[in-house]
Image (spheres, rainbow, N blue to C red):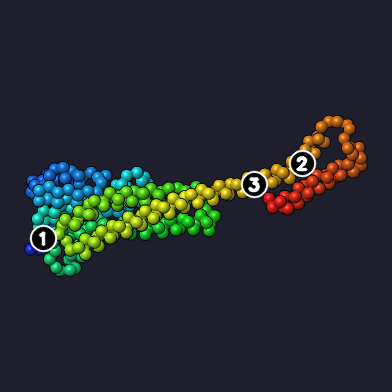
Amino acid sequence: MPIDTIYRDSQCEWIDVEAPTEEDIRFLHERYEINHLLLEDTLDPNHLPKYEETGNIRFFLLRESTELERKNLNTISDISTKIGIFLLGRTIITVHRMKTKSISETQKNISALNNEMAPESIALKIALLIMKSFDDESISLFETMDNIENEIFLKNTNHTNQIKRLYKLKRKSGLNFRVLTISTDAIDKFKLLGLQESEFFDLKDKHKDVVADFDHLNIQITNLISMFLALSDQKANQVMKVLAIYSVYFLPITFIAGVYGMNFDNMPELHHKYGYFLTLGLMAAVVICTFIYARRKQW
């Protein structure tokens, strides 16, 4: 997508660059004298959030949560996309690799207001929507965790599948928490833009809320994994207990059958007419006595 001016009034010009090419980066450097290193930061998909100030240029690099489902969750680019915000006097330049809700919704909101906006106010609106994207993600992850918890404790589901889902959930939550924690310094720097204190504190409070949500989510997921593993161990112990009890029932009669299986003539009741039936009755009596004993011991 080419470099596009998406908003302009007497106080502000907003230039947006989506999926920048080397040619776009060169143009921004020559036209606005933006440091090459700052522009290169916008091309790195895994760059962490930060704030830098060079001369009259103030640069925010933030990350927005994405709704894309990735098979692998190894880096922060698997759960978020970066947005570079350059503030140069009355000009604001946003650079990003893909379409983002924060940019499109900010543009719609400004168009609907019909009021002149300062570049700093536009940057603040973008940052608020970025925090909202993480808030929406935390709500979605909480709902997923609740569904998994219900399936574990209320339904008989595939345990192997559940542990995989919990692991993926923990990875997503951990990566989001890392992004938000690293974003703290960049969010604090919005105080330098000369905004009203109430506007800055709205952003600061929103950031604190989502950080607290993901911190709580991480703890809940860890506890759920521990409970899941404990439940699995308990079920395995129940199976072993049943098998052990059955072995106790059949051990005595297996011994009797083994004795009578030996080729010796001197066996009790061997030549008796009802010897075979008496032996079977003795085995049954041993099993019944063992069963009664186990019941009394509440095994």
For label 3, the SS is: helix
Relative to 265, is 31 on the left or the right? left
For label 2, the SS is: helix
Looking at the image, which residue is at 39% across and 52% down? 218
Q: Earlier in the sequence, mark 1 or mark 3?
A: 1
Task: Using the image as rendered, state which of residue 185 and residue 110 is in the foreground.
Answer: 185
Query: Which residue type does callout 2 highlight?
Result: Pro
Whether residue 125 is situated above or below residue 177 in the rendered picture: below
Relative to 144, is 156 on the left or the right? right
Looking at the image, which residue is at 71% across and 51% down? 297
The disc at residue 108 is none
Query: Which residue type does callout 3 highlight?
Result: Lys
Task: Using the image as rendered, state which of residue 153 and residue 81 is in the foreground.
Answer: 153
The disc at residue 241 is 3
Residue 44: which quarter of the image?
A: top left
Q: Earlier in the sequence, mark 3 or mark 2?
A: 3
Q: Residues within 10 Å of mark 2 (few under 14, many from 20)?
A: some
Which residue in the structure is indicated by mark 1? 12
| Distance Cα–Cα, label 3 vs label 2 | 18 Å
Q: Earlier in the sequence, mark 2 or mark 1?
A: 1
Looking at the image, which residue is at 28% across and 57% down? 207
Relative to 157, is 12 on the left or the right? left
Q: How far across and how far down the image is residue 170, in percent?
A: 40, 49
Which residue in the structure is indicated by mark 2? 252
Q: How far across and how far down the image is residue 229, in percent?
A: 51, 48
